[in-house]
Amino acid sequence: VRKKPLVVITRKLPDQVETRMRELFDARLNVDDKPMTQPELVAAVKEADVLVPTITDRIDAALLAQAGERLKLIANFGNGVDNIDVAAAGKRGITVTNTPNVLNEDTADMTMALMLAVPRRLTEGAALLRDGGKWAGWSPTWMLGRRIWGKRLGIVGMGRVGTAVARRAKAFGLSIHYHNRKRVAPAIEDELEATYWDSLDQMLARMDIISVNCPSTPATFHLLSARRLELMQPRAYVVNTARGDVVDEDALIRLIEQGKLAGAGLDVFEHEPSINPKLLKLAKTNKIVILPHMGSATIEGRIDMGEKVIINIRTFFDGHRPPDRVLPRSA
Ligand code: 8YV
């Protein structure tokens, strides 16, 4: 009988995923769910056959340099692999996989929630009643927000999540515009009646809402730079459910404070889990709605992610290429 691979899972996963992992592998679980310390991560890469990290673990070249002979697979519990130095892993013969597709719809749902939340003053209204007794009564000029239907949505990154956002937004009556490294297939452009903008600058200048849906890579760091954010209309909003570092957060804050942007809905930040105190202050003015990185946080989604991780590990040890192998990005 072949020995089961030693699989170290850095965080607590849904019970049914952990049970299945225990059945299939020599699974080392993190029962109390504290993020692993650096020495714990070093110990893990030294002895494991497979590491299952999450966004909270930095798997960089220095850590990988300490990996043992046995480490052959890093099966990320997450879609984005910005937490992993994929090229450094490749050089050491370590395969990297992720969990694509199963989070697209959940993340797109949360994007829509954030897209509506600020213009329609959702958290402001909810807080008013939740905090009790502050509603003096209805009036025609009471709690007026801005409509989102009929407006222009510019999607930065028309990949799997971006497309799921576009489908929803189209149904909400927004017109769809996008900027991407490549144009999407004509059939998708037709379905979405989407307009492709080769120039991100030009798109930003003309949109009412911008949704960030691209991964964090060296090429997308501060893609929405101060200069680019300044091109946007003062009535425009920014929604980000991708990665905080795609947007120059300081510039975004400054422009909202100065009234040069109308607001933002943010699920991700540049230095998670710490939040810039200026964002906390802005949230009190209701110009922004901020959430603690919960775009894909559904029970079903986490179970689907666990299943993907399991399939990737099993396929790998069956001697095949795992379905969600991630290759290093070409520069
Ligand atoms: C998770 C995510 O919070 O998958 C991603 O890229 O941002 C989220 O689904 C996280 O990645 C879990 O590791």
Image: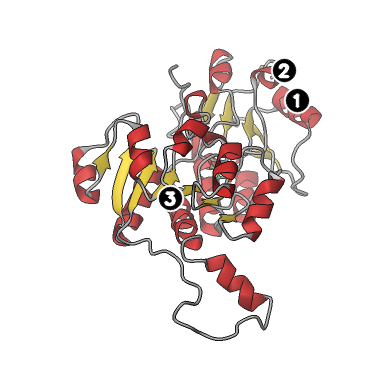
Nearest to viewer (mark 1 / mark 3): 3
Structural distance between the alpha carbons of marks 1 and 3: 45 Å
- Is residue 159 visible in the rendered structure shown here? no
Q: Earlier in the sequence, mark 3 or mark 2?
A: 2
**Tags 2 and 1 in contact by the CB under 8 Å rule?**
yes
Q: What amino acid does circle 1 point to?
A: Val
Q: Residue under label 3, please give it.
A: 236
Q: Residue under label 1, please give it.
A: 42
Q: Residue under label 2, please give it.
A: 66
Q: Position of residue 262 (x, y in %)?
A: 49, 53
Q: Quadrant of the C terminus?
A: top left
**Tags 1 and 3 in contact by the CB under 8 Å rule?**
no
**Which element carries disc 2, helix, strand or loop?**
loop
Q: Quadrant of residue 81?
A: top right
Residue placed most toward the observer, 86 or 143: 143
Above or below 177: residue 327: above
Structural distance between the alpha carbons of marks 3 and 2: 47 Å
Residue placed most toward the observer, 142 or 6: 142
Q: Earlier in the sequence, mark 2 or mark 1?
A: 1
Q: What amino acid does circle 2 point to?
A: Gln
- Is residue 98 visible in the rendered structure shown here? yes
**Which element carries disc 3, helix, strand or loop?**
loop
Instruction: Left or right? Give the position of 100 relative to 302.
Output: left
